[in-house]
Image (cartoon, grey):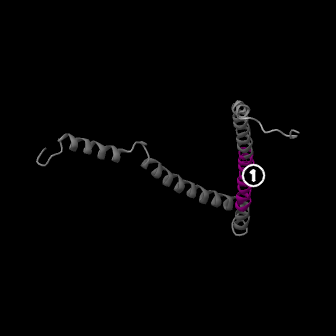
Amino acid sequence: MASATRSPSLVELVSELPGRVTDLVHAEIQLLKTEVIGKIKSLGIGAGLLLGAVIVLGFMFGVLLTAAILALSLVLPGWLAALLVAAVLLIVAVILALIGWRVLKRGIPPIPSESLHSLQSDVRTIRGLGKRGAA
């Protein structure tokens, strides 16, 4: 009597191999797509929440500035208190802009000039143009 389940022969297994490999590749690609889409969704949601937090912090900064103006208005006239807070903000902005400009100028042009100069010197030395006593 033959068994209920028969083992596939070697020929059958070899003939099924390309189809199984294709199915495996398709399944792996689908898994990859699903994982990447999930991560991109998480990144988008996280970025949106961080942007919302930055916006709320901007509103909070405005409230703190208003509180500073109101506190100063107890000692000075309201218009002078607002002008004083605006002047302090302007000074801070100018200082930050000057520091940023200096840092930016250090990066302009974005060419590694020191490395290029060193490389050119090495090339001249290899060619024999940088020997001792040469002008």
Q: Quadrant of residue 20?
A: top right
| Residue extending furthest toward the front | 1
Q: How crowded is mark 1: few (under 14 residues within 10 Å), some or many (20 or more)?
A: few
Q: Is residue 78 magenta?
A: no
Question: What residue did someone put label 1 on?
Answer: 49
Q: Position of residue 75 (x, y in %)?
A: 70, 69
Asked which secondary structure carries label 1, the reply is helix
- Name the side, left or right, on which 22 lies relative to 113: right
Three-letter residue code for mark 1: Leu
Q: Where is residue 85 in the image (x, y as percent from the top left)?
A: 65, 60
Q: Does the magenta stretch include residue 59?
A: yes
Q: Where is residue 49 in the image (x, y as percent from the top left)?
A: 75, 51
Instruction: Give the residue displayed 72% in from the left and 67% down from the top.
Output: 71
- Name the side, left or right, on which 121 lies relative to 65: left
- Up-down: is 101 above or below 60? above
In the rendered structure, which segment of residues is drawn in magenta?
Answer: 39-65
* Count of all numbered marks drawn on residues in the image: 1
